[in-house]
Image: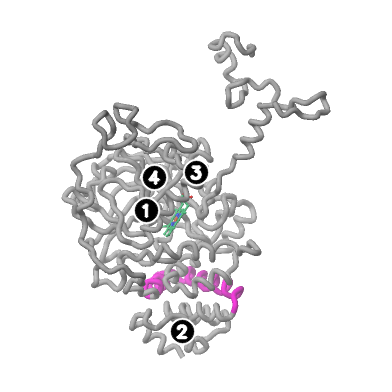
């Protein structure tokens, strides 16, 4: 029963628990008809209830992510082994999340595709995002990775270009192979990623059956301030499953969101997906003995030399109660690290670290870190940051609420003492420059990947490449065949056959300055014709 305003407020609240109200708490008496002069109108403008309802609806969407717009979040926990393989982990890192055997930390994961909009098909040939937010007692840690282990480029300056090439044409709004391979054929560091992406790995069967990788190189820091370079790998307990283009087309004919549905359904059935987290490690130096740079995200670290060792497992056991609040507003970033974890000088990582929080201040708002899904819920948050659009609360303050500055002797917040965070890792020096890294070696690992594939995977890769490149201009086809021949002659010859281009045809091409090739690549090139 509803009471008129001015009645007994306590009673009126209790009795109207299921009653629709507006955001001001006013009961809504009629949700079917606007207020009009007579039954046929005109409508009146003082109708607050209608205006509030429609103008909130007008603002329901926030900008979708500029990349990774289509995705799904799940919640769960991480359980540490307390070890790196068989060795106590505190020798290598003081990060609280790994410290004790059996220690559990809440987390949220968001899986995604990269290029399509937020309602696009989950069957797309596209890298998959694999972003994990650990809510630790030392603050949040985000590990923002993908399912392929490498990336298209190694310098953040090129990110807008690679994404523009992959996104739809700005005139026709169609994803165009000609634009994609125009860019890639002049970007030899993309070859390793392309060999992966156009193999079946480029279309994971769903999100539960795919690997995840941190991709960029990070550091671990121990209590003595010693640093090591690390790479992260997530291995699905359910195994890895991928699809061919034909499998994907069959699913896409019926639905666009099969991977999101699969996650809701499996967790709904109580089948909680699980991944083991493994870590590769090497000493924190340049490793001049390697044929690649350990800070280059277009490379993997050979597993025999740098074995990935288990440090814990992740279990996903709860889907969002509200997709918008937990999936659209969740905000990850590579700068979000806890004590014991650090950045490397990887030139992509530094660019990513700026980009994520920058876009989130635009996409979600300057106070995005106060939202429940982003808030460091298991740590104390005390800042002197105040105000701004949609401030939800004052972050924890010192004992004197008047003091929102530091330093102060009148009860404000003060710095954490004791840690020498800025005195760790090797010394570095150099002149300011704009230069490629010396050990680019863009073809060797792409070739090794091709050799490691099963025959059906190679066949699928060759078929997919011919299909895409046959939609490209001849000079772009030739440049791609040139790269494929340097990767592995079998790959180059097979794709070339499909396009009517022989090794002889491209022998005189030089899409790249020769000094960017390794001596082995130059030998291979000399023998092409
Ligand atoms: C999302 C930038 C490279 C994985 C994003 C977003 C931006 C961005 C702006 C949207 C974030 C948001 O709106 O919340 C960049 C830049 C890169 C880069 C500038 C290179 C310099 C990479 C690489 C990986 C990656 C190498 C994989 C290792 C992801 C993932 C997401 C994402 C997983 C989605 C996060 C989510 O689910 O909300 N990136 N990215 N990005 N990026 Fe990158």
State the extent of the magenta-drawn residues as a range: 444-473
Q: Secondary structure at mark 2?
A: loop
Q: CA distance from mark 4 to mark 3?
A: 17 Å
Is ligand 1 within 8 Å of the beta carbon of the residue shown at mark 2? no
- CA gap, disc 1 to disc 2? 39 Å
Q: Is mark 3 within 8 Å of ligand 1?
A: yes
Residue 414 falls in image quadrant:
top left
Q: Farthest residue toward the top? A: 8
Labels 4, 1: front one = 4
Ligand 1, image quadrant it occupies: bottom left
Could one spot residue 212 in this view of the protein? no
Image-based side of 172 in relation to 365, left or right: right
Residue 364 marker: 3
Q: Is residue 367 left or right of residue 28?
A: left
Residue 133: numbered disc? 4
- Viewer can see residue 318: yes
């Amino acid at each position: 029963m509803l009471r008129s305003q001015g009645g007994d407020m306590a009673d009126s609240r209790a009795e109207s628990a299921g009653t629709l109200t507006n955001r001001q708490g006013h009961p809504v008496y009629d949700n079917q008809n606007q207020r009009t002069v007579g039954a046929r109108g005109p409508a009146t403008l003082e109708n607050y209830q209608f205006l509030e309802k429609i103008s909130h609806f007008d603002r329901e969407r926030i900008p979708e992510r500029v990349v990774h717009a289509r995705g799904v979040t799940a919640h769960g926990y991480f359980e540490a082994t307390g070890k790196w393989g068989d060795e106590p982990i505190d020798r290598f890192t003081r990060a609280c999340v790994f410290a004790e055997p059996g220690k559990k930390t809440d987390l949220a994961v968001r899986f995604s595709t990269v290029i399509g909009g937020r309602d696009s098909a989950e069957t797309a040939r596209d890298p998959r995002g694999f972003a994990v937010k650990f809510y630790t007692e030392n603050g949040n840690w985000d590990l923002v990775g993908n399912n392929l282990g490498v990336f298209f480029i190694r310098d953040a300056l090129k990110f807008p270009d690679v994404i523009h090439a992959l996104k739809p044409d700005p005139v026709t709004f169609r994803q165009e192979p000609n634009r994609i391979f125009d860019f890639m054929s002049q970007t030899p560091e993309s070859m390793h990623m392309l060999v992966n992406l156009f193999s079946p790995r480029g279309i994971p069967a769903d999100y539960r059956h795919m690997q995840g990788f941190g991709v960029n190189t990070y550091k671990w820091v121990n209590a003595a301030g010693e640093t090591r370079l690390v790479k992260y790998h997530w291995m699905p307990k359910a195994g890895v499953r991928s699809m061919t283009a034909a499998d994907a087309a069959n699913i896409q004919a019926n639905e666009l969101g099969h991977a999101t549905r699969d996650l809701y359904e499996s967790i709904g059935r109580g089948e909680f997906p699980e991944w083991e987290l493994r870590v590769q490690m090497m000493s924190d130096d340049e490793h001049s003995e390697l044929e690649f740079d350990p800070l280059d995200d277009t490379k993997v670290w050979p597993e025999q030399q740098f074995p990935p060792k288990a440090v814990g497992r992740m279990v996903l056991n709860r889907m969002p109660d509200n997709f918008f609040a937990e999936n659209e507003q969740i905000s990850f970033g590579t700068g979000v690290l806890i004590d014991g974890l650090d950045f490397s000088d990887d030139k992509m990582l530094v660019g990513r670290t700026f980009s994520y929080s920058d876009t989130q201040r635009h996409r979600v708002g300057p106070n995005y870190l106060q939202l429940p899904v982003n808030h460091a819920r298991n740590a104390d948050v005390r800042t002197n940051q105040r105000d701004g659009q949609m401030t939800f609360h004052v972050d924890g303050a010192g004992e004197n609420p008047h003091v929102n500055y530091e330093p102060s002797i009148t009860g404000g917040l003060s710095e954490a003492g004791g840690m020498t965070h800025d005195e760790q890792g090797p010394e570095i020096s150099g002149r300011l420059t704009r230069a490629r890294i010396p050990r680019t070696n863009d073809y060797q690992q792409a070739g090794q990947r091709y050799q490691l594939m099963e025959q059906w995977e190679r066949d699928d890769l060759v078929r997919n490449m011919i299909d895409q490149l046959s939609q490209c201009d001849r000079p772009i086809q030739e440049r791609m065949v040139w790269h494929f021949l340097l990767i592995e002659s079998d790959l180059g010859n097979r794709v070339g056959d499909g396009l009517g281009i022989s090794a002889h045809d491209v022998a005189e091409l030089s899409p790249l300055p020769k000094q960017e090739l390794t001596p082995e690549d130059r030998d291979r090139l000399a023998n092409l014709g």
